[in-house]
């Protein structure tokens, strides 16, 4: 069960990277990769915060899923703490 949480964090990163490159969802659908891709055009105009906050939210969500998966693994298999 705990491997599912780790897979979810990887899935979020893969979805964001594929949609950032333009191969995933269309630009009409809300996705973090689409938001980051569209915000890149504003970096040259000095609106860096339009890319910073979606990027930070992506890092935060992926980090939280990874941490949650690690904690669930510790709860389900206490002997894995020493690994």
Image (tube, helix red, strand yellow):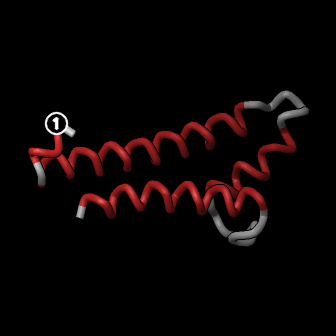
User: What residue lies at 85% left-to-right and 28% top-to-bottom?
Assistant: 46
Left or right, 34 with respect to 65, comes to right
User: What residue lies at 68% left-to-right and 62% top-to-bottom?
Assistant: 18
Task: Give the x, y percent position of residue 36.
Answer: 71, 48
Q: Is residue 76 above or below residue 29?
A: above
Q: Is residue 3 above or below residue 43?
A: below
Task: Give the x, y percent position of residue 26.
Answer: 74, 71
Left or right, 44 with respect to 66, comes to right
Q: Is residue 49 above or below residue 41?
A: above
Considering every residue shown, the one lying at the far front of the view is 83
User: What residue lies at 77% left-to-right and 45% top-to-bottom?
Assistant: 39
Q: Quadrant of residue 9?
A: bottom left
Helix, strand or loop status at disc 1: helix
Label 1 crowd (10 A; few <14 / some 14-19 / many >=20): few
Task: List the residue tagged with mark 1.
Answer: 82
Left or right, 81 with respect to 55, comes to left
Left or right, 47 with respect to 83, comes to right
Quarter containing the N terminus: bottom left
Quarter containing the C terminus: top left
User: What residue lies at 70% left-to-right and 53% top-to-bottom?
Assistant: 35
Q: Quadrant of residue 21?
A: bottom right
The foreground one among 39 and 24 is 24
Q: Is residue 40 above or below residue 28?
A: above
Task: Give the x, y percent position of residue 32.
Answer: 62, 54
């Amino acid at each position: 069960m705990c491997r599912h949480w780790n897979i979810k964090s990887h899935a979020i990163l893969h979805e964001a990277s594929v949609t950032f490159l333009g191969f995933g969802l269309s630009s009409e659908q809300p996705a973090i990769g689409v938001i980051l891709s569209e915000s890149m055009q504003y970096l040259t105009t000095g609106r860096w915060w339009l890319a910073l906050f979606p990027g930070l939210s992506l890092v935060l969500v992926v980090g939280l899923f990874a941490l949650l998966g690690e904690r669930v693994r510790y709860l389900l298999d206490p002997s894995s703490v020493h690994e």
